[in-house]
Image (spheres, helix red, strand yellow):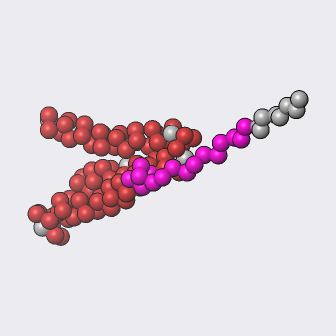
Amino acid sequence: MAAGLLGLLLTALEVLAPLAGAVVAALAIRRRGRNARLAMVGCLVMLPAPIVSALGVTVALEPLMQWVGTFMAGRVLTAVTLPFHLVGLGLVLAGALSEPKPTARPHAPAPAVVEP
């Protein structure tokens, strides 16, 4: 029972971590613009991976073990969730490493010239 609860806790953390990242990135969109949008989309792309993994273990593990064998079933499930992680991580890195767009600064009025 303890192992089941620990597995549930780890799955919840796997879902909540990208969700929290998406919220933080969404709050930074005004300051960071495109970079924060890329990071937010990356976090949202990573979000379904643990859900797909848990559903795959629950629903498809036994038929998968009969189809590809016991040893390869876990690897196939990993291969199914890997694109979520890789694309999401790529988007987060693109948001973090790309140069921010320069913000337009309001021009100060030219100082008035006073003639003597």
Report x, y in % for residue 109. Answer: 77, 37
User: Residue farthest to the right?
Assistant: 116
Q: Main secondary structure of the magenta part?
A: loop
Q: Is residue 15 left or right of residue 32?
A: left
Q: Is residue 110 left or right of residue 91?
A: right
Residue at the image position 72 percent from the left and 37 percent from the top: 108
Classify the position of the C terminus by image quarter.
top right
Instruction: Choose top left, top right, bottom left or bottom right for residue 111.
Output: top right
In this rendered view, identify the residue nearer to me: 48 or 2: 48
Report x, y in % for residue 105. Answer: 65, 42
Magenta residue span: 93-108
Q: Is residue 43 visible?
A: yes
Classify the position of the N terminus by image quarter.
top left
Residue at the image position 12 percent from the left and 67 percent from the top: 69
Asked whether residue 81 is drawn in magenta, I would say no
Give the answer, above or below, for where 13 lies relative to 69: above
Q: Is residue 27 left or right of residue 8?
A: right
Report x, y in % for residue 28. Answer: 51, 39
Report x, y in % for residue 113. Answer: 83, 34
User: Residue farthest to the front?
Assistant: 116
Residue at the image position 37 percent from the left and 57 percent from the top: 90
Residue at the image position 42 percent from the left and 55 percent from the top: 94
In this rendered view, identify the residue nearer to me: 72 or 38: 38
